[in-house]
């Protein structure tokens, strides 16, 4: 489950009244894009809908954490530091 920083994505989650799951808007192994037109071109045959809220601010890829076991495990480092994740995980 991603916790997006983008206000349109957060608004969509609020409207649906639940978290939404999604993958990155790029083909696996290809660089991420901040341009909805590029996403539409590269994924045109693989998506049903593209909500175009303009270019995204970009930055590091998401921090990915495996929480399927008793202790969280870092899968990919991103903008949220491991120390912050550990504090939150131990509070939960």
Image: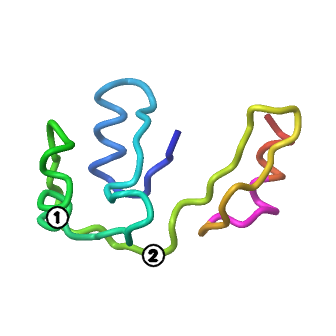
Q: Which mark is residue 41?
A: none
Q: Is residue 81 magenta?
A: yes
In the picture, which quadrant includes the C terminus? top right
In space, the residues marked 2 and 1 are separated at their CA atoms by 15 Å
Q: Where is mark 1, residue-wise?
A: 54
**Residue 26 occupies quadrant:** bottom left
Which residue, given by chain and number where applicable, does mark 2 sit on? 59
Residue at 53 percent of width and 39 percent of height: 1
Q: Does residue 35 lie above or below 53 as drawn?
A: below
Report x, y in % for residue 69: 82, 33
Which residues fall within the magenta stretch? 80-85
Q: Residue at x 19, y 61 (%)?
A: 42
Mark 1 closeness class: few <14, some 14–19, many ≥20 residues within 10 Å? few
Query: Of 22 and 4, which appears nearest the observer?
Result: 22
In the image, what residue occupies the spot 61% across and 67% down? Answer: 78
- Magenta stretch: residue 82 in it? yes
Q: Identify the residue shown where x is 63% and y is 53%.
A: 64
Specify which label sits upstream in the sequence, 2 or 1.
1
């Amino acid at each position: 489950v991603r916790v997006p920083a983008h206000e349109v994505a957060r608004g969509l989650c609020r409207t649906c009244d639940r978290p939404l799951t999604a993958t990155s808007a790029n083909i696996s192994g290809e660089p991420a894009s901040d341009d909805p037109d590029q996403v539409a071109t590269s994924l045109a045959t693989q998506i049903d809908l593209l909500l175009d809220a303009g270019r995204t601010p970009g930055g590091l890829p998401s921090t990915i954490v495996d929480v399927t076991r008793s202790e969280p495990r870092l899968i990919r480092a991103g903008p949220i530091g491991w120390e912050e994740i550990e504090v939150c995980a131990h509070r939960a």
